[in-house]
């Protein structure tokens, strides 16, 4: 949303609240825009060749589906590798 247009309010507490809301909006927007940037760089969202609106929407939805699936697979792989190499049960540890 960005900074409000016009003269700032005379009440300092109201001005402080507006600045806090602007900062919170900017933080939320950064996270969302970062994911869109990742989609453009790594998943080809900047190169959609579909001509029809419905087809383009389908391609975009599929790209975001792939992004979500890849993230979940990365988490599952991390958990698996952590279990495999990091936290072995007692019966698999070598005895001294």
Image: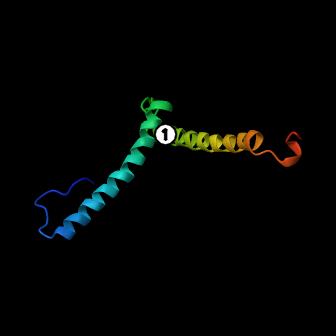
Q: Position of residue 25 (x, y in %)?
A: 33, 56
In the picture, measured across the screen, residue 73 lies left or right of residue 41, that is right
Q: Looking at the rendering, which quadrant does residue 75 occupy? A: top right
Q: Which quarter of the rendering shows the C terminus?
A: top right
Q: What residue is at 71 percent from the left and 42 percent from the top? A: 82
The colour scheme used to paint the residues is rainbow
> For mark 1, what is the residue?
60
Q: Position of residue 89 (x, y in %)?
A: 83, 48
Compared to residue 21, the image places residue 77 above or below, namely above
Disc 1 secondary structure class: helix
How many dots with numbers? Answer: 1
Q: Looking at the rendering, which quadrant does residue 7 occupy? A: bottom left
Q: Nearer the viewer, residue 19 or 93?
A: 93
Q: Which quarter of the rendering shows the N terminus?
A: bottom left
Q: Position of residue 90 (x, y in %)?
A: 85, 48
Q: What residue is at 45 percent from the left and 31 percent from the top? A: 41
In the picture, measured across the screen, residue 27 lies left or right of residue 81, that is left
Q: What residue is at 42 percent from the left and 31 percent from the top? A: 46
Compared to residue 47, the image places residue 85 above or below, namely below
Q: Residues within 10 Å of mark 1 (few under 14, many from 20)?
A: some
In the picture, measured across the screen, residue 81 lies left or right of residue 68, that is right
Q: What residue is at 34 percent from the left and 57 percent from the top? A: 24
Q: Nearer the viewer, residue 37 or 82?
A: 82
Q: Nearer the viewer, residue 36 or 23?
A: 23
Q: Position of residue 55 (x, y in %)?
A: 49, 38
């Amino acid at each position: 949303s960005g900074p409000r247009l016009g003269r700032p309010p005379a009440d300092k507490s109201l001005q402080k609240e507006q600045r806090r809301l602007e900062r919170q909006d900017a933080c939320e927007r950064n996270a969302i825009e970062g994911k869109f940037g990742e989609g453009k760089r790594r998943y080809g969202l900047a190169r959609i060749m579909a001509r029809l609106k419905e087809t383009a929407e389908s391609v975009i939805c599929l790209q975001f589906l792939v992004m979500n699936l890849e993230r979940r697979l990365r988490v599952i792989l991390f958990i698996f590798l952590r279990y495999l190499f990091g936290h072995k049960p007692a019966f698999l540890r070598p005895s001294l």
